[in-house]
Amino acid sequence: MFIVTVEMTQERKDQLLNWVDSHQKATLENDKGILAGLQWMVDKLDLTDHLYSEMVVTTPIIINQTIIDECKKKFEENWIHALWNSGFALAVFAVLDLFSIQIVEFPTAKRN
């Protein structure tokens, strides 16, 4: 487990809120996956309070193996839904990238 401290800047808040808002009425599977991934990351990284706060806050965000394992499990459970899965993965990586967090080795779903 490792802890990454990031600053929840107004630009980051605006970007995340814009992404979530732009996918709220998703009808395509890829877009539904993006929305699910965005919401999942906001929940997993405990960002909800910070997104809707008026103050800019520096907060520790904990990213551990459990989050990566849960993401892998979601990929494995939904591999048959390739478009949804690709959208979900795109959202996960986009949120990590927004905070300049890079995962060197990321698990992929295995098809049986």
Image (cartoon, rainbow, N blue to C red):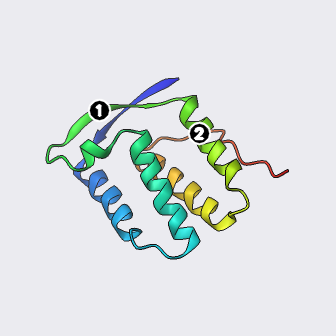
> Looking at the picture, does residue 51 appear above or below residue 67?
below
Q: Position of residue 107 (x, y in %)?
A: 69, 42
Tell me the crowding category of disc 2: few under 14, some 14 to 19, or many 20 or more residues within 10 angstroms, Cα based. few
Q: Position of residue 111 (x, y in %)?
A: 81, 52
In this picture, residue 46 sits left or right of residue 91 = left
State the residue lying farthest toward the front: 77
- Number of the front mark, 2 or 1: 2
Determine whether the residue tagged by mark 1 lies in a helix, strand or loop.
Answer: strand
Q: Where is residue 59 in the image (x, y as percent from the top left)?
A: 29, 32
Snapshot quadrant of residue 67: top right
Give the mark nearer the N terminus: 2 vs 1: 1
Q: Where is residue 102 in the image (x, y as percent from the top left)?
A: 53, 41
Q: How far apart are marks 2 and 1 (CA)?
A: 22 Å
Which residue sits at x=29%, y=39%? 7
Which dot marks residue 59?
A: 1
State the residue lying farthest toward the right: 112
Tell me the crowding category of disc 1: few under 14, some 14 to 19, or many 20 or more residues within 10 angstroms, Cα based. some
Which residue sits at x=66%, y=50%? 75
Amino acid type at circle 1 is Thr
Q: Of 112 and 54, which appears nearest the observer?
A: 112
In this picture, residue 47 sits left or right of residue 53 = right
Which residue sits at x=35%, y=56%? 16
Q: Of 26 and 104, which appears nearest the observer?
A: 26
State the residue lying farthest toward the top: 1
Which dot marks residue 111?
A: none
Snapshot quadrant of residue 85: bottom right
In this picture, residue 23 sits left or right of residue 18 = right
Instruction: Give the mark count.
Output: 2
Snapshot quadrant of residue 14: bottom left
In this picture, residue 70 sits left or right of residue 97 = right
Q: Name the residue under label 2.
A: 70
